[in-house]
Amino acid sequence: GAVVSQHPSRVICKSGTSVKIECRSLDFQATTMFWYRQFPKQSLMLMATSNEGSKATYEQGVEKDKFLINHASLTLSTLTVTSAHPEDSSFYICSARDPPLREQYFGPGTRLTVT
Amino acid sequence: QKEVEQNSGPLSVPEGAIASLNCTYSDRGSQSFFWYRQYSGKSPELIMSIYSNGDKEDGRFTAQLNKASQYVSLLIRDSQPSDSATYLCAVNPGGGADGLTFGKGTHLIIQP
């Protein structure tokens, strides 16, 4: 299957600071990438869809000004958590698909802890 | 609101037996269906995808889809202790351009 990387794997930051997470498709070009969030003991929830060269589409209830997404190239999407708060602590996972295939492949995830 | 339902388990199965995992979904127009395996603390790993009614086999795994009943299942034959994980059912409303809606997952335990 397709390979997706994510960096960093783990980050601890102080409340009020911003954190950037990178998602890369390593062996294919991904016109669309997706960002999910998973809280402990819960399933994955889609946050936003990232389209190369255009604005991201956010799911209902996700603050677009807090979670900034930039999909500047066919292999890279970034998620910036701005003014992070302890309630933003979660497991953030990106996925990408290799069109025209329908399958989404997930990166290894980034565990964010806000103190 | 689109929903995907799974029994959270835990589902305990003896080693070597068949594990049967089930999933129902609410959006009748859904077209793409996936099973992911997630180990504790790790990200999901794609196990199977299925798009048409019927069965799809890949090694020890068989996915079954019944769109009329809005039902997807995953069978794992010759279960191994390494199959112990949470299995997530995911549904895509269209041909792949949309994000996935996940069920809460079924925790599977394979007993040696």
Image (spheres, coloured by chain):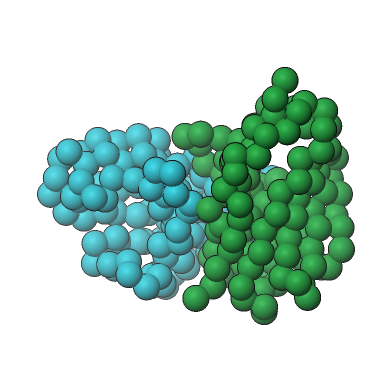
Chain colours: A cyan, B green
- Image spot of residue B6 (x, y percent): 61, 55
Looking at the image, the residue that sits furthest to the bottom is B29
- Image spot of residue A24 (x, y percent): 49, 48
Report the residue at 67% width, 51% height from top. Answer: B35
B86 displayed left or right of A19: right
- Image spot of residue A95 (x, y percent): 52, 53
Can residue B83 be seen in this snapshot?
Answer: no
Looking at the image, the residue that sits furthest to the top is B112
Rendered view: B98 above or below A1: below
B27 displayed left or right of A78: right
Where's the C terminus of chain A, which quadrant? top left
Q: How many marks?
A: 0
- Image spot of residue A107 (x, y percent): 51, 44
Report the residue at 70% width, 54% height from top. Answer: B22
Where's the N terminus of chain A, which quadrant? top right
Report the residue at 75% width, 55% height from top. Answer: B73
Rendered view: A46 above or below B35: below
Can residue B104 be seen in this snapshot?
Answer: yes
Report the residue at 36% width, 61% height from top. Answer: A70
Q: Quadrant of residue B33?
A: bottom right
User: In front: B20, or A9?
Assistant: B20
Q: Quadrant of residue B18?
A: top right
